[in-house]
């Protein structure tokens, strides 16, 4: 399994139907909390439960959707998150995966040190900080008291590792593990002794950028009147800023410090070539801006977390690094330069949209990066990252349904792209269709259950089913230009569906995008499966277009076409 095949990794509103409200919006929150207690069967409430608000969405018709994290006797409940749906104080339903109210002892049998030791036997000795452990209730399966043990380190290619092991607090057995990203202190927060410098006087400006991929583009920057230079910081988009990691020689070689802020004397950035370090930074600034504008224009979402705050993008991460990643811990992205032999810098527009969407997912559904939920997490980034590319509609980066096609240099043996939404199996490992169960072992491998609990197939490949669904929902069983008769792939409409429904018609990109986003932000939770995703998108289509509408019927027919029932 090549590292390139896994590229685009995670470490980790007024829309058509609703808007995101501040989490301290007391009225909807109070009503939702009352609904939880009044409907214990539907919400799996127990008297020892506590709830922390993670987001509020209010539809134009007054329907309220309040997202909560759950605790039990003061311990975080992993997999206990839920969304309460109500209108005019009347409870409608709840979206959640927890099967029953919690009722378990919270006194561990083994010590935290023992849990750390057991997890360390899997992680090995290449950790770079002291591991930690906290007690939690693990409720994705049979509710179990567990330790959440955190080990941090780096993969062989330099990608940070932030590995959580859930260790049974009675037996010491490892229940499962999840990987995220190890990060450091963002710029400007790492002052030592003495007084921090005064905030500079910044004035919005518009510079000219010559990029690697996007051509010559305007970029929003800031004039620093205190230091008399321009900064690659966007005051119009929450102070999103771009830094240079110096290929590992700035910011400690990892994400510690996040490099050095890009600055310039004349507000003209880059040359369009790798020899100018600002060229990749122009692509990053352009990608951040287009992704911000996509979420704002399509859904009324201000920023990745919906709070109006910008993020940091760190270019030139390590040396010959073939990847890019988002970390919710530092609210930042890092981009490698590629190896220069087969790959180019990982700052193409769909890569930018993909990685920032991981942040949106973390701030909303919180899909775990494992099994079916992990596949849906990755697919969400592919789907909405691709829609960012369509939104930008830059002739230098023509929109399509390929992922990362601009990254590959034209050399023998290189694939056209990382992934193919219309026919995921072109990459030889992703799935076009949900496993039909004829091979129980493969079904376990795909879903990460049974023998493969805590493992299973990589989410970049289980994402194929949802990517395929979205393409068919938007476009129908239509073969993209360049992949049909006479091409290397010679695809026909029958090759695009799993059930022979070659007459399947799409609802268009706009409707498909609105349906997926609403399903993500209103109905999906951390452990959502493919079957749950079908239900979530059906509900979203009903909200947006009506029960029995052509759009809702198309959602059902399209899931059938990828064998999700």
Image: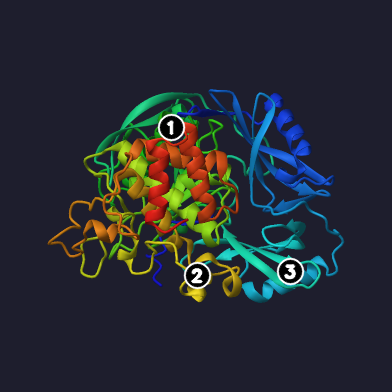
- Horizontal and vertical percent position of residue 160: 54, 60
Between marks 1 and 2 in the image, the one whose residue lies nearer the viewer:
1
Q: Residue at x 45, y 62 (%)?
A: 462
Tag of residue 452: none
SS under mark 3:
helix
Distance of label 1 from label 3 (alpha carbons): 50 Å
Between marks 2 and 3 in the image, the one whose residue lies nearer the viewer:
2
Q: Is residue 346 left or right of residue 450?
A: left
Q: Earlier in the sequence, mark 2 or mark 3?
A: 3
The residue that mark 1 highlights is: 545
- Horizontal and vertical percent position of residue 510: 35, 36
SS under mark 1:
helix
Quarter of the picture holding the N terminus:
bottom left
Distance of label 2 from label 3 (alpha carbons): 31 Å
Q: Is residue 308 visible?
A: yes
- Examine the image and state in which quarter residue 206 appears: top left
Is residue 512 placed above or below 450 in the rendered structure?
above
The residue that mark 3 highlights is: 116
Give the camera-side residue of 500 and 455.
500
- Horizontal and vertical percent position of residue 517: 47, 40
Give the farthest residue toward the left.
486
Q: Is residue 199 left or right of residue 489?
A: right
The residue that mark 2 highlights is: 443
SS under mark 2:
helix
Q: Residue at x 51, y 74 (%)?
A: 440
Is residue 200 placed above or below 315 in the rendered structure?
above
- Horizontal and vertical percent position of residue 127: 63, 68
Render colour scheme: rainbow
């Amino acid at each position: 399994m090549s590292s390139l095949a896994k590229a685009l990794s995670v470490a980790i509103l007024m829309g058509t139907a609703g808007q995101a409200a501040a989490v301290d919006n007391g009225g909807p929150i109070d009503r939702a909390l009352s609904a939880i207690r009044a409907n214990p069967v539907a919400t799996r409430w127990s008297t020892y439960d506590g709830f922390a608000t993670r987001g509020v969405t209010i539809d134009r018709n007054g329907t309220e959707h309040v997202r909560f994290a759950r605790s039990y006797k003061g311990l975080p409940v992993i997999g206990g998150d839920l969304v309460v749906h109500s209108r005019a104080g009347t409870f409608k339903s709840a979206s959640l995966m927890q099967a029953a109210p919690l009722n378990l002892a919270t006194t561990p049998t083994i010590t935290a040190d023992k849990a750390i030791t057991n997890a360390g036997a899997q992680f090995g000795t290449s950790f770079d900080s002291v591991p930690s452990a906290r007690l939690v209730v693990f409720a994705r399966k049979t509710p179990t008291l567990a330790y959440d043990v955190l080990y941090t380190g780096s993969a062989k290619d330099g990608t940070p590792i932030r590995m959580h092991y859930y260790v049974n607090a009675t037996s010491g057995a490892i229940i499962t593990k999840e990987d995220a990203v190890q990060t450091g202190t963002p710029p400007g927060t790492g002052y030592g002794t003495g007084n921090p410098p005064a905030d500079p006087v910044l004035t919005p400006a518009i510079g000219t950028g010559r990029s690697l991929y996007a051509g010559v583009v305007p970029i929003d920057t800031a004039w620093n009147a205190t230091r008399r230079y321009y900064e690659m910081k966007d005051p119009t988009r929450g102070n999103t800023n771009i830094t240079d990691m110096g290929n590992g020689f700035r910011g400690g070689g990892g994400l510690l410090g996040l490099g050095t802020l890009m600055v310039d004397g004349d507000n003209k950035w880059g040359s369009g070539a790798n020899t100018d370090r600002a060229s990749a930074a122009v692509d990053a600034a352009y990608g951040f801006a287009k992704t911000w504008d996509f979420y704002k224009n399509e859904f009324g979402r201000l920023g990745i977390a919906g709070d109006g705050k910008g993020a940091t993008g760190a270019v030139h991460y390590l040396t010959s690094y073939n990847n890019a990643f988002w970390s919710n811990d530092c609210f930042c992205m890092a981009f490698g330069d590629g190896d220069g032999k087969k790959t180019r810098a990982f700052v193409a527009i769909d890569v930018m949209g993909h990685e920032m969407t991981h942040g949106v997912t973390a701030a909303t559904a919180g899909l775990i990066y494992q099994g079916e939920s992990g596949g849906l997490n990755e697919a969400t980034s592919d789907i909405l990252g691709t829609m960012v590319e369509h939104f930008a509609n830059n002739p230098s980066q023509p929109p399509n349904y390929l992922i990362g096609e601009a990254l590959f240099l034209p050399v023998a043996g290189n694939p056209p792209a990382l992934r193919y939404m219309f026919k995921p199996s072109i990459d030889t490992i992703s799935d076009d269709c949900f496993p039909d169960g004829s091979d129980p072992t493969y079904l376990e491998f795909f879903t990460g259950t049974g023998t493969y609990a805590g493992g299973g197939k990589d989410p970049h490949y289980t994402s194929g089913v949802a990517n395929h669904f979205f393409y068919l929902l938007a476009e129908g069983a239509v073969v993209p230009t360049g992949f049909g008769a006479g091409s290397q792939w010679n695809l026909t409409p029958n090759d695009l569906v799993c059930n022979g429904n070659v007459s399947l018609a799409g609802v268009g990109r706009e409707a498909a995008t609105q349906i997926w986003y609403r399903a993500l932000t209103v109905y999906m939770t951390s452990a959502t499966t493919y079957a749950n995703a079908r239900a979530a998108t059906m509900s979203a289509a009903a909200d947006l277009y009506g029960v029995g509408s052509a759009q809702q019927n198309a959602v059902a027919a399209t899931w059938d076409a990828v064998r999700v029932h």
